[in-house]
Structure formats: C-alpha cells, structure tokens
Amino acid sequence: MLNRNVAVLAGTLVISIVIFSHDISIVDSTVDLSGTKKIGHYFDVLSANYEASSGEAAGASIRYKEIVSEKKDFVDVAYLTHLLESAKFQEALNASKLYTKKYGESIDVSLVQARALEFLNKNEEAKEVFAKLLKDFPDRKDLAYHYALFDIKRQNFEGAIGTIDTFLEKTNLRGSHAPFCFLKATIFLQPPHPDEKKALLWFDKALELNPRFERAWRMKVAVYEQLGDVKGVMKSLKSALSISPDDNDLRKILVTSYFKHKMFLEAHDELLKISEETEEHHFDLALTSWNAKKFEDALKEIDESLRQSKNFRKAKLLRLEILLALGKKEEVLGELSEWVVAAPDDLVLLNTFHGLQKGHIVASRLATVIEKAHEKYGNQPGLLCVMTDLLVKSRQYKKAQKHYPKLISLMKGRSDVINAIAYNIGYMKFHENKLDSAEKHIKQLLKRDPDFYAAKNLLAYLYAQRGDHLAEAQKLVIEAKSAMPLSPYIIDTEGVILARIGRLDLARSAFKKARVAAPLDLSIRKHFEKVEQKLATSMMAG
C-alpha cells in the first residue's frame, strides 16, 4: 500500500498545477490586447501583458499598478489572469465582473471568475460558472482541465475522473493533453485507498503524449520508490534520460536513487556525465567515491570542492572522514586544531569530535586539540562541554572536575546539561572505585530525571560489579533497554548481571550481541572472554 508521503506529493503537485497551469501548456499564453486601444495606453498595456505572459510577474505588477492608477476602470484578460496567478483572488473576481460589464461575456474572463470563486472558497458559485461554461463550450480543454482540478480540490474524485474521461474520449490526443492523464494518475494516489497500478498506467499515458513531462517522470519514480521496486525506478529514469540525455535534473534523481540503494559506483558514473564545475558537484563526486571506498579519488574531488569554496562546511567534514579512512590521523588532528581555533562556537564541528572517537582517534588526543582552543578563547560553553566530556572519556578526571564549576554556572537553567554533568561525576566516581559516592550521585540524578536511561544503566552496572541489589539491577537494565534496545553498553550490563547470578550461557549470548555492535570495546571483550573461560572450566569440571 502506498504510504502517505506519495499521496501528499500528489496533492502538492495538483495544487501547484492549479496555480501554475500555464507551465504545462493548458492555458494559451499569447498576449491579449482586447480593449487597449480604447483606453489610450496601448504600449504600456502591451509591455505589461508581455511581461505577464513571459512569467515576469514582478515587472508586470509594477506596470499594471501604474496603468490602474491612471485609469481606474482599466481591465483586460491578461491583467485578470495576472491577478489570479498573483493570488489576488478578490481583485481578480472584481475585475472580471467589471470586464463583463464593460465588454460583455468572454470565455476566458468567465474562467478567471470561476477560478477566483474557487480560491475564495465560494464553491457553489464556482461550480455554477464552471458547469455553464462546460455546457456551452464542451471542447475547450482549459475549461475541462480546471473543472477537473476544482473537483479534485473538493475531493470529488469521481467527478474529476468523469470530466477527464469525457473530454479525452472525444479528443484527438496530443502532447498538450498529457496533463489530463497526469491528473488522473494523481487521483489514483489519493488516500484512503490508493491504486498504484492504475496511477502508473496513467503516468505512462501522460509520458506517451509528452515524453519530456518531467513532473510525470518524477511522480512515477516516487511511486516505484514507495513500492520498493528498484528495477522500476531505474528503468523509468533511464528511459527518461534516453529521451532527454541533457536533463541534469533527471540525472540527479537517478544519482540519488543509486545512492539510496548503495550503488555508489553507478552513482559516480552518472555524476561524471553532468557537466558542472561547482563545489556541490565535486562534493557529490567525493561522497560517492568515499562510499565506494575509492578514498584517493574522493580526496582529489573534495580538495577541488574546497578550492572553490574554502568554508564549505560539509566538504570540510567529509575531508576529515576521507583522511581518517586513509589512516592520516595526524593530518585530521592538525585540521581539527586549525578549525576549532578559528570557529570555537561551531556546534556541528564540536559534535564531530564525538564521532571521531569511533575512527580510532583516542579521546585524549581529541581533548588536547580542544584544550588548545580553550586556552585561546576561555570559557566558551560549547567548547567547555565537549572538552570536559572528552577529558572524562580519556579518564583525565581531575582536569574535567576543575572545569565543571564554571560550566555549571554558564549553564544555569539548562537542566539537560546539568544532568549530563551529574552523570559524568557519577561515572568518574565509579571509575575511581568510589562506588558509594558514585551511587549517591546517580540516585540524586535519577530523582531529578527518572528517564535518564544511561544513569539507570550505570547504576545497574555498579550493583553488578559490587555484587549486591541484583534484583534492582535487573529491573534498571530492563528499563534502560526498553529505551535503547540496541545499545551495546546496556546489553553488556545485562550480561554482567546474568553472569553474577550464574546464568553463564545467557551472559555469553548478551556479550556476543554487544561485541557485534561495539567490536573495539575492550571492556566488553574482557567480559566475553571471562565468561567463556568460566564456561570452559565448568565443562571440564563436569
């Protein structure tokens, strides 16, 4: 079943077509000069109408305003259409009535009137005007199209399909009729019972009539994506590109699809077909190369991206990842040092320090980089937060504790930060083997914040290490695991408790899961080896 996102996308496209229907060749965009000679502003009106028909809405608005200021009863069809497409619906309605009064009825003016009434939510009046127009002029495609849209907006989907089918059945289909098929396809995507197969069928019909209909290609791809049909996605995009090989927008959709499905080499090959020399393009080339594990190629592309824009943050962050993949840790530390000294309040950069610990850069080295920036800039809050956290993780507890009073004073009112500091203090006390003091700090924290699951895990681990309150420890770890079921550290705590109560097989199973999630964690590895040894000894004794 198609999920809500495609239905929303379909609805969004329908609304955009309502407002900008001239984009897909429904409305005749030729300049209308009706009545201009009568008011003596021929060239002013000609210029305004030309700008309006060319999509220069701002320029057209200025010119029309000048004309209306001199001639209060000025009105013509292009001006009415401009008011409508500028979302000035009441003005469009008033002007359409003035036109009819001055020059008599006109199909185009009546259509403007119907659409203005629609946007003003005067649906019964709009329906009456639409119905009269379609009765008198059943072969006008713009009337049929906008009436179908009117029904779609009111969720009268059967009525819209009836209008579309009636019109298409008596028409020799051409490219300009593709939007009718597109509209019908979007109707089949509407909740609560979308029909993806029928939608795809009508998108195909739209594309048969107009192979360059980009919105239809995009929607077709979106449907295949939601259905999980990778082959359908790729086939559709490749078909579109065979028709429009220079359409970079479509090619970028194909690149995105390849990337989403981890086909990084294919994504890279398609990117190379796009002739762009921008920092973003070289970043994309670097990203696909990095994901394809072609790190040297990735480094060349990211350097070119940064050559074009030296402050391009995404590129700077990716460069760190690439250097890390190449094993150039010293270079990473050097760049980090320069960057953090230049931008000590860059929170994205500061958060990067936590991620880099996973890249085999020890916390103590990262802490040193931050400390140098702290020496220069003093007590900048973000800098202090990251620095103290890294000091704790590198077991430089005395250094961390020295900075906490200042950090607490800077973070008054930030209970989340204060609680994190309290957790770190409990953590340090635990690792200093001051278990009673650690227990006291953690319990005080949990009174303030009962949902601090890392603290529950730490307290459970403390009980397991000390060998008491094991029932309470089991309860705490179950609560922590319910919030973070995949955390290797919570699973490890569970294993320690199970080992304490003699459930060695279950403990080994828990440690195995924890090792898969955190294969480099020495503590988890020691726990696993210890329980393996106990099991082996038990088997030998038996």
Image: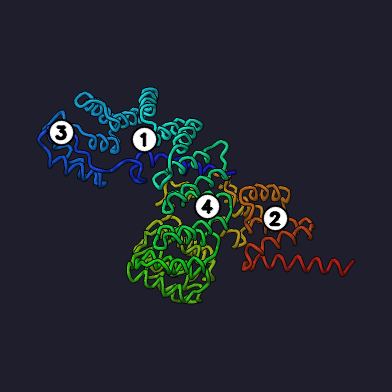
Asked if the residues shown at circle 1 and circle 2 are in contact, with their CB atoms under 8 angstroms apart, the answer is: no
Residue for badge 2: 494
Q: Mark 4 or mark 3, which is nearer the start of the sequence?
A: 3
Image disc number at residue 422: 4
The quarter of the image holding the N terminus is top right
**In this picture, residue 154 sits left or right of residue 515:** left
Residue mark closest to the camera, 3 vs 4: 3
Does dot 2 land on a helix, a strand or a loop?
helix
The 10 Å Cα crowd at callout 2, few under 14, some 14 to 19, many 20 or more, is: many
Does dot 3 land on a helix, a strand or a loop?
helix
Residue mark closest to the camera, 1 vs 3: 1
Q: Mark 2 or mark 1, which is nearer the start of the sequence?
A: 1
Residue for badge 1: 140
Q: Mark 3 or mark 1, which is nearer the start of the sequence?
A: 3
Could you give the CA–CA distance between mark 1 and mark 4, rounded to whole angstroms?
73 Å
Could you give the CA–CA distance between mark 3 and mark 4, rounded to whole angstroms?
69 Å
Q: Splitting the image into 4 quarters, where does residue 380 fall?
A: bottom left
- Name which residue type carries label 3: Val
Residue 92 in the image: above or below residue 189: above
Residue mark closest to the camera, 2 vs 3: 3
- Name which residue type carries label 2: Glu
